[in-house]
Image (cartoon, rainbow, N blue to C red):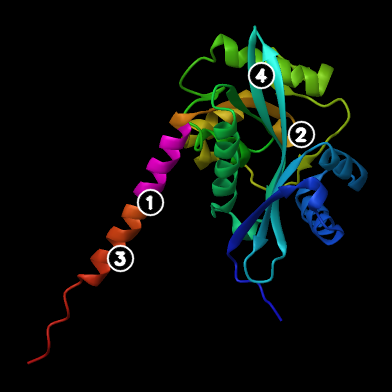
Amino acid sequence: MAVKNGELCSRTLPVSALTETEIDQMWSLFGDYYADVTRERFLQDLSNKQYLILLLDRGDSSVQGFSTIQVFEREVLGKNFISVYSGDTLIHRDYWGQTALQKAFFVFLMKLKLKNPLTTVWWFLISKGYKTYMLMARGCPEYWPRHDKATPVWPAAVINALATEKFGDDWKPALGVIQFADPAGRLKEGVAPIYPDLLNVDEIRYFNERNPGHAKGDELCCVGRIDAKLAAYYIGKLSVKMWRRYSRRLKHTLQPLPASAE
């Protein structure tokens, strides 16, 4: 009998290819972490997405996380673009810190960009938790809004157009957040709270300032540009990690042997 080994792997698939067992496990996980949610609304949101990154324990293939994806084309300020909308995104706390989701999403984005080399691609993300915001802040060299630069006109217009289309009057453009008239889900108490020491991180402090109602379920709307700079940025980060890992192993290998007792 297969048992969990604590290591994540991923599968990217059409939502239509999900099994009932996988959907049940996704809902069970979602309900453990979010309040003010119903299975009916969860399934409705899922049916509106085209793709899904499913995160599985490598040992027993149980569902330990997922991220839903919707892709569509739009025009704003006379410019055509493709939007990649990240919907519900969740990872079981036992697997926090692993990068299976980031790797799978990067591959998805790069495949989409290669198929559409002449069209701008924006990743559209809404975030009620700082960990979700950090996926974009640490994963995209060009993203908005951000703590160190004002949002340019076109990204701001893209955010406004997409948020208005999807969330109507719940989108508050002056605040840059979605405030749901009817509860649409919030993180349960104790799930990824922002402790005082985390506010020393510029991106987390900024998220907290821009979305002070995140604990109530308010969502900060963001976009990140998907282009060659992202590919170079990701490959560069991966190379640094590999070099550090190699250096640690080399240092361990070259440790001097203890002197023998005379």
Q: Residue at x 59, y 26 (%)?
A: 121
Lateral position of residue 229 relative to residue 255, left or right: right
Q: CA distance from mark 3 to mark 4?
A: 45 Å
Q: What is the chief secondary structure element of the magenta stretch?
A: helix
Q: Residue at x 90, y 45 (%)?
A: 38
Rendered image: mark on residue 159? 4
Residue 254 seen in the current view: yes
Location of residue 156 in the rendering, given as x and y in whole percent from the top left corner: 61, 14
Along the polypeptide, which appears first: circle 2 or circle 1?
A: 2
Asked if residue 25 is among those painted magenta in the image, a careful observer would answer: no
Along the polypeptide, which appears first: circle 2 or circle 3?
A: 2
Q: Are marks 4 and 2 in contact (CB under 8 Å)?
A: no
Lateral position of residue 195 relative to residue 182, left or right: left
Q: Which residue position holds label 1?
A: 241
Along the polypeptide, which appears first: circle 1 or circle 4?
A: 4
Secondary structure of the residue carrying numbered label 2: helix
- Give the magenta part as a residue range: 230-241
Q: Are marks 1 and 4 in contact (CB under 8 Å)?
A: no
Q: Which residue position holds label 2?
A: 216
